[in-house]
Amino acid sequence: MNRRNLLIRAAGLAAVVGGAWWARETLFWPAPDLDFGEGSATPWLPYARRANVPTVKARVEGREIIALIDTGAQYSVIDRRLVAALPPQRRSMFEMPLIAYGVGGGSQMGRGTTVEARLPGLTIGKLRAAILDLGPLASEDGLNTPLILGRDVLEHLVLAIDPARRHVRLIAREAFVRPPDLTPTAVRRSGGGLVAQVTVEGVPVDAVVDTGASSMLALDEATAQAAGLLDGRPQETGTSLVLGGAVQAAVLEARTVTFADHLYRRVQVGIFEQPPLPNFPGALVGMEAFAGRRVAFDLGAGTLHVSRPLDLTVG
């Protein structure tokens, strides 16, 4: 198995990608300028990588790259190597007292930059991004996505994803018309993200809905303990790509998980180390939860609409 396949399957676990990025200080983060040109949405954009997380082709200051669309990222992030490769006149730096944390407990001090990112049908102007070392998330032998579009962008539009077709679309909120087969899923808005209640073997758990995570469910150790999963059942070891590198994670099987009015059986659950930070999520629901379904996120309005899968039970 090569590093590029890590995100698809790693010792039975679809690796958790980056998870949420959380700032220790409360920062003023201006909204970017969103210009859909003559339309009100991008076309349906094919995934640019083999992984099941939404990735799209983009241009940053004229340089062609791949971007990860991540509802679990509190702010947009750009890899240090990409910033260093931009022409000096294209670099707009500002000091930013930011400490970024990722799943697994890794942390980095951040500076900031302002760039222009262009996707087919959408120009994102005055995009502020934290400059961090994304490690294998940005490297050619990893996911190779040196730009992460986070909630600072996504909260101003609607994100539509069709995982079966491996396509994604960004839509102006005022232009979005909900397809009739997409029904509301109970979520609440927290920290700019969406939190849904899942049950793990009957135990309710609040989880951040994270398009940057490829597995169905990941829990921190305390949440896994409270859900009764650390009861001596067999465990495997998986590898997760996280902030600045890769970490080993325990992987075990939950007999049942429910999410969005759907029952899943024999779910592989990754267990991650909780960073020393208040309000860091204890659980992440990732893209595998939307396999065979379509989904529309409106982070700004705090809504999530999901289609029903063809089968009543998965697993």
Image (spheres, grey):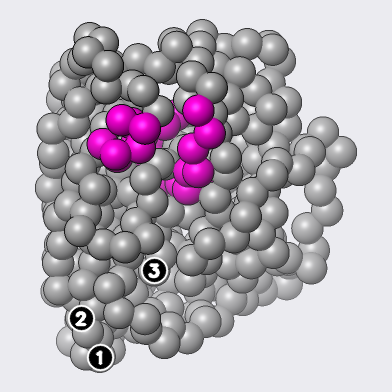
Task: Tell me what residue is drawn at x 61 percent, y 70 percent.
Answer: 156
Viewer-proximal residue, 251 or 199? 199
Q: Does the magenta stretch include residue 18?
A: no
Dot 1 alpha-carbon crowd within 10 angstroms: few under 14, some 14 to 19, many 20 or more: few
Can the viewer see residue 15?
no
Decide: is 161 above or below 150. Answer: above
1 or 2: tag closer to the N-terminus: 1
Contact (Cβ within 8 Å) of mark 1 with mark 2:
yes
Q: Of helix, strand and loop, which one carries label 2? A: strand
Q: Of helix, strand and loop, which one carries label 3? A: loop
> As drawn, is 65 to the left or to the right of 309?
left
Q: Is residue 214 magenta?
A: yes
Q: Magenta segment, which residues?
A: 203-226
Distance from Cα at disc 3 to Cα at disc 1: 15 Å
3 or 1: tag closer to the N-terminus: 3
Which amino acid type corresponds to the residue marked 3 in the rendered image? Tyr
The location of residue 281, given as percent across then percent down, is 38, 51
The location of residue 112, given as percent across then percent down, is 26, 81
Mark 1 = which residue? 94
Task: Tell me what residue is drawn at x 69 percent, y 37 percent.
Answer: 306
Which quadrant would residue 314 be assigned to in this image?
top right
Distance from Cα at disc 1 to Cα at disc 2: 7 Å
The location of residue 295, given as percent across then percent down, is 65, 40
> As drawn, is 284 to the left or to the right of 257?
left
Viewer-proximal residue, 174 or 108? 108
Mark 3 = which residue? 75
Mark 2 = which residue? 111
Image mark for residue 21? none
